[in-house]
Amino acid sequence: MKSLFFGDPSEPLINSIRASATYDLVVEQLRRAIFLGRFIPGDKLPPERELASQMLVSRTTIREALRVLEGEGLITVKRGAAGGLTVLGQGRLRPAEIEVYLESQHELIDSVFEFRVANECLAASLAATRRTKKHLDRMSKALQIMADLCSTPQTRAVTENIAMFLSRDSEFHLAIAEASSNKFLMAAIEESRAAMFLPIGKVFTRLEDNANDHHEAIYQAIKDRNPELAAQTMRLHIEATRASLHNLLPKSRRTRKKQISVPAKKSARRKASASQ
């Protein structure tokens, strides 16, 4: 019987399986928690014993996972009463390094933003019709913290505030995903949020004046149960974030970096921002 699947006939329909070590699964879960901003620089992860109990694995497995995370520069492990498992901040790139880094990552970044448009606009639209007071409260708390962090030039200039802002930004977008009540959208949006951790964290050294743009408007559209406006504003927000990274490149390089597959609106071409 011939296969009904389309694609390259030389490619196998069933791929081989690589068995994963248990510690790899622990690494993935802890790495994702850090990438989603659930732990920010300076925070301590739960102790080994507690992690082993929560994740139902041995302490030996936890130690192996922690060695990987430490090798990746995500945490530091110190023994003793004053020690612990501390999350580290990302190393910031120097201005001369940003161009090279963005050039090397542009395919990943473009793919993530296209993925975000496809999923987050729909999630915002659904959230406007399905949200509850609990969802709105969660969004509102994240909004307030982001507003405080961006309130003055002084707070925007504090490097440590970038991680806190990105953490609350992630919380805001994940709250919208949850309000959509679609588990597939929730998983997709969480995936894209985690994928943006390294590009965003490395290139910005301060919160720009427009870092918090669009968040309040997205929230208001969802609160007002206006699905079309919620989706439209979310698209503007994602395009503006894509443009903020695009604007870090020299002007001579920007001409070949196009906006997300749809025509870009003027409001999407704003100056660089650490907003996601």
Image: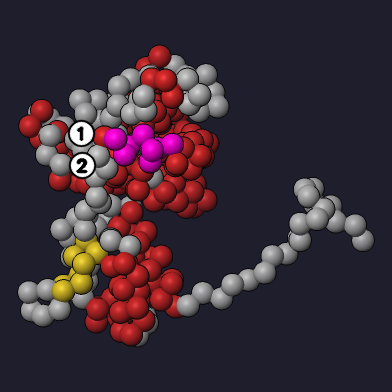
Asked if residue 115 lies in the magenta stretch, the reply is no
Q: Kindly indicate the quadrant of the structure image that contains residue 22.
A: bottom left
x then y, percent, for residue 60 = 33, 85
Among all residues in the image, which is located at the extreme top? 266
Among all residues in the image, which is located at the extreme right? 1
Residue at 24% in and 64% down: 75
On-image quarter of the C terminus: top left
Circles 2 and 1: CB atoms closer than 8 Å: yes
| Up-down relation of residue 67 to residue 159 (above or below) | below
Residue at 33% in and 62% down: 72
| Foreground pick, 150 / 180 | 150
The CA distance from mark 2 to mark 1 is 6 Å
Asked if residue 100 lies in the magenta stretch, the reply is yes
Residue 176 seen in the figure:
no
Q: Kindly indicate the quadrant of the structure image that contains residue 43.
A: bottom left
Q: Amino acid at mark 1?
A: Leu
Label 2 environment density (alpha carbons within 10 Å; few <14, some 14–19, many ≥20): many
Q: Secondary structure at mark 2?
A: helix
What label sits on residue 243 in the rendered view?
Answer: none
What label sits on residue 207 in the rendered view?
Answer: 1
Q: Kindly indicate the quadrant of the structure image that contains residue 63.
A: bottom left
* Segment colored magenta: 96-103
What label sits on residue 162 in the rendered view?
Answer: 2
Residue at 52% in and 51% down: 184
Give the colour scheme shown.
secondary structure
